[in-house]
Image (cartoon, rainbow, N blue to C red):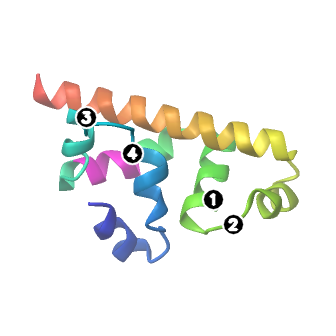
């Protein structure tokens, strides 16, 4: 499904799978579900539900392939703020998507 998102937007690097979804050890259930078209829709919707700082930093980093320094220069956030917004945004995306998948399966 990430390949479809990449095709749709033309900007998502392959590293998104590794950085957002990769976990040491075995693949978790939510990772397997993440490959479905429905999960792709959840990902796009959840990105829009992030707070503005997280949404901006995650979009710039993953979709536009900007470095932390470029994001800092473009937004005025410090490097530590950029890193924090990206990490918190990834975590919040995962939580929101898991919640949506859980609600759908109930």
**Picture coordinates of residue 22 (x, y %)?**
39, 45
Marked residue nearer the N-terminal end (2 or 3): 3
Q: Nearer the viewer, mark 1 or mark 4?
A: 4
Residue 21: numbered disc: 4
* Neighbours of disc 2 within 10 Å: few (<14), some (14-19), many (20+): some
Kindly check if marks 2 and 1 are in contact, taking CB atoms under 8 A apart as contact: yes
Q: Write the residue at 32% across / 36% down.
A: 25
Asked which secondary structure carries label 3, the reply is loop
Give the main secondary structure, helix, strand or loop, of the magenta stretch: helix
* Neighbours of disc 3 within 10 Å: few (<14), some (14-19), many (20+): few
Kindly check if marks 3 and 4 are in contact, taking CB atoms under 8 A apart as contact: no
In the picture, which quadrant includes the C terminus? top left
Marked residue nearer the N-terminal end (2 or 1): 1
**Picture coordinates of residue 90 (x, y %)?**
52, 40
Q: CA distance from mark 1 to mark 4?
A: 15 Å
User: Magenta part of the protein: which range?
Assistant: 39-45
Asked which secondary structure carries label 1, the reply is helix
Disc 1 marks which residue? Answer: 61
Q: Write the residue at 39% across / 39% down.
A: 23
Marked residue nearer the N-terminal end (3 or 4): 4
Disc 3 marks which residue? Answer: 28
Disc 2 marks which residue? Answer: 66
């Amino acid at each position: 499904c990430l390949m479809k998102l990449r095709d749709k937007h033309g900007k998502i690097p392959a590293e998104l799978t590794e950085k957002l979804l990769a976990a040491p050890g075995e693949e978790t259930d939510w990772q397997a579900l993440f490959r479905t078209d429905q999960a792709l829709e959840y990902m796009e919707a959840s990105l829009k539900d992030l707070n503005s700082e997280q949404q901006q930093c995650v979009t710039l980093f993953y979709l536009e392939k900007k470095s932390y320094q470029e994001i800092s220069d473009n937004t005025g956030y410090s490097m530590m703020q950029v890193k924090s917004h990206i990490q918190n945004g990834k975590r919040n995306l995962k939580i929101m998507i898991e919640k949506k998948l859980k609600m759908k399966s109930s």
